[in-house]
Image: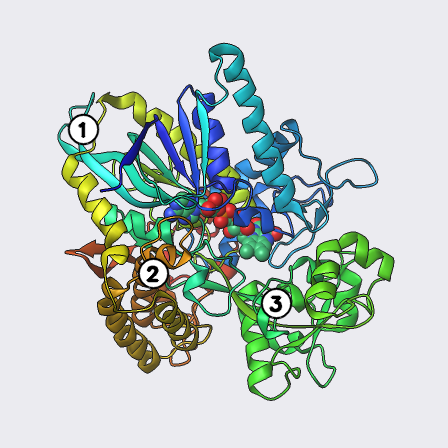
Amino acid sequence: DAPVTHHTYDVLVIGAGGAGLRAAIEARLRGKRVAIICKSLFGKAHTVMAEGGIAASMGNANPNDNWEVHFRDTMRGGKFLNNWRMAELHAKEAPQRVWELETYGALFDRTAEGKISQRNFGGHQFPRLAHVGDRTGLELIRTLQQKIVSLQQEDFARTGDYESDLAVFHEYTITELLKAPGERSDGKDGVDRIAGAFGYRRPTGELVCFHSAAVVLATGGVGKSFKVTSNSWEYTGDGHALALRAGAKLLNMEFVQFHPTGMVWPPSVKGILVTESVRGDGGVLKNSEGERFMFNYIPEVFREQYATSEDEGDRWYTDADNNRRPPELLPRDEVARAINNEVKEGRGSPAGGVYLDVSSRMSAQEITKRLPSMYHQFKELADVDITAGPMEVGPTCHYVMGGVEVDPDTAASAVPGLFAAGEVAGGMHGSNRLGGNSLSDLLVFGCRAGAGAAAYLDTLTGVPSVSDEALQSAREDVERPIHNSGGENAYTVHQELQQTMNDLVGIIRKADEMELALKKLHELRDRIPRVAVDGRRAYNPGWHLALDLRNMLMVSECIAMAALERQESRGGHTRDDYPTMDENWRRELLVCSLRDGEVILEHQGQPAMRSDLFDLFELDELKKYYTGDELGGHRSDAP
Ligand code: FAD
C-alpha cells in the first residue's frame, strides 16, 4: 500500500479563491495555525478570472448609494428568495472589505477626484462595482496572496519558519472529509465532528491526511457538470459533495445561473465568458435584424425601473438620476432567457447567438482601455476585432446559487467544525446572483468563516482524532479507479453527464426532460463505480476525473431533483411548463441531504424577513412577490 503523509493544523481551508484566502487570513489573525489547500496552482482559482468588479455601496459614483439600496437590489435580483440576513450582512460589510483590500495593497481604478471608481452592472441601481479595468479578480487574488506572504514574513521573524502558521498546499485535491466524536466545553460531547480531510497530491499521486478540527470549504462552483460553461476544469462541485457526504445540507440547488454572454464561436472556446462590463459600459445586444431586442423583454416586476426607449436608455449613462437604465442591464436570468428566445425564434447570429456591439458605442481607444481582456480574448481566440465589429454571444453555465446551508453570522454548517463560504455556500443570492455580488460575498463571508472557525475551536476541550477505519475507507475510494480493471472510461461518462445536464436540465426546463435526466443520472450512478484508469499515480488526469465524477454526479442529481420539484419559474430556474413566478413558492426552500448514500429532497420554510428590513421596500413592490397573508405588519399599516 502507498504510504499516507500526515499534517496537523488548527484550521484547514479547502480552496484558494477569494473566500478561502480571506478565511485563512482571518483565522491566522485570530491566532490559529492554518493550511490552505487547492486543486490547481496557487493563484489560479476562479476568482482570478473575475472581470467586471466587486459590488460595494461606497457611493463614490453616486452619493445616493448606501447599504440599504444594495440590500434591496440584491433581494430583487434573487427574487426575494435570498437568506435576508446574509444579504443584509453582505450589503453592510462589502465597503469595509473593499477598503481593507487597499490596505493589503490593492489599487482600484480611480475617479477624477481620486476616489475608487465604480461601474454600472445589471440589477444594481447605482454604479457600484469597484474595478481594475476588466481584471478585478486578478487584483483581488494578488493582494490577498500578498497579505498572506506578509503574514508569513511576520511568522518567520517569530518562529524561523515561513510556513509555521500559514501553509499552502497547492495541487492537492481533497476527496473526503473525516469525522470523529469530539468534546466541547458546552457539554455536547460525543457528537461526530470534523476531524480532518483526506486527499492526494496531483503531481505525484501521494496520499495525504490533514488532521484538523475545523474545515472551511471554499471550493467554488459546479459548472463542469454542464457542457457549455464559463467554468474551468476544477469546478466539479467537490465542496458541495464533500459537505453532503459529511452530513451537511445543500439548499437552492435548482438555481443555476446561465450568464447571458458567453462566446459562441469558435466551438473550441464556446462558453468562455464575455464580461457584463461590456454592457455596463454601454454595449448593446442586437438580433440578426439589427433590433435592440431587450426592450421587448422587460418583465412586469421591473417595468418601472427600466427605460422603454433607446434614447432614454442611452441618456442614463450620463444622467442616471433623471433617466431609467437600459434593459440590457436587467438581471442576468432575464437577459439570458431573452437571448435564448431570440435564437429560438430564428433571429440569432450564424453561430447560434446574438450580437453584442460595443464598437459603434465607444472609441477604439476607450474599448482597449476599459475592456483590455475582452479585446485580447476575441482577437486571439476568435480573430474578431471588437473595436471594429460586434461579438457573437450566447448563454453559458456560469454560477451556482445553491450550496451548503450555513449560519449567516458564522458560516457554520450543520456539521460541527464544518464551515463554508463563497460560491460553495448557499442562500445569499436567492434564485439569482447579481454580477459583482460574488467577489463581495467571498470577502464578507470568507472573513466571517475564518472568524467562525477560530471561535469554534475555542469551544473545544478535546480535538477529535481520525480513526483508522475512516482513513482506510477514504483511501479505498481514492484507489478504486486504479484497482478496477476494464469497465468504464471516465471521459465518456463525463461527456454523457455534461450533455444530459446541458440538454435536459439547462436554461429552459420541462418535467418530462428532467425525469429523463434523472433516469440517465441513475444509470451513470451505476457506471461510475466501474470507471477504471491506468495505474499511474503521477499526473494522471484520467484518475483525477474519475474521482471528480462522483461529485459531479451527486451535485447534478441535487440540481435535477430540485428543478423537477419547483413548479414555477424564478431567477435561475425557468420552467417551460410553469412559466410564471408563484408567490407561494417563495416561502419554500428545497433542501438536499444524503440518506443511506442516496440524495433526498425536502421542503423547508423560509423565515420571515425582519421587520426593519421588510420596511425598506414599498408595499406595492412586495405585493409582486409575497402572498397577501405575509404583508401584514408593514410600516404602511401603522396608524
Ligand atoms: P474559487 O475562486 O472558484 O476557488 C475555488 C478554490 O477551491 C480553487 O482554489 C480550487 O482549486 C479549490 N478546490 C476546489 N475543489 C477542491 C478540492 N476538492 N480540493 C482542494 N481544492 C479544491 N463574480 C463577481 O462578483 N464579479 C465578476 O466580475 C466575476 N467575473 C467572473 C468571470 C468568470 C470568467 C467566472 C468564471 C466567474 C466570475 N465571477 C465574478 C464569479 C466569481 O469569480 C466566482 O463566483 C468566485 O470567484 C468564486 O470564488 P470562491 O472563492 O468561492 O472559489
Q: How is the image coloured?
A: rainbow
- Residue 415, position in %: x, y? 25, 40
Q: Which residue is mark 2?
A: 549
- Residue 497, position in %: x, y? 36, 70
From the viewer's perspective, is residue 634 above or below residue 170? below
Q: Amino acid at mark 3?
A: Thr
The count of marks equals 3
From the viewer's perspective, is residue 34 above or below residue 107? above
364 or 582: nearer the viewer: 364
Residue extending farthest top: 158
Q: Which residue is mark 3?
A: 261
Decide: few, some or many residues near mark 1? Use Cα within 10 Å; few <14, some 14-19, many ≥20.
many
Q: Residue at x 57, y 33 (%)?
A: 145
Q: Which residue is mark 1?
A: 182
What is the spatial separation of the Cα atoms under label 3 and label 2, in whole angstroms? 27 Å
Decide: few, some or many residues near mark 3? Use Cα within 10 Å; few <14, some 14-19, many ≥20.
many
* Residue at disc 1, secondary structure: strand
Q: Earlier in the sequence, mark 3 or mark 2?
A: 3
Q: Amino acid at mark 2?
A: Leu
Q: Quadrant of residue 318?
A: bottom right
- Residue 612, position in %: x, y? 46, 42
Q: Earlier in the sequence, mark 2 or mark 1?
A: 1
Number of the front mark, 2 or 1:
2
Report if the CB atoms under discs 3 and 1 are less than 8 Å apart: no
* Residue at disc 3, secondary structure: strand
What is the spatial separation of the Cα atoms under label 3 and label 1, in whole angstroms? 48 Å
Decide: few, some or many residues near mark 2? Use Cα within 10 Å; few <14, some 14-19, many ≥20.
many
Q: Would residue 349 appear left or right of 385 to someone viewing this image?
A: left
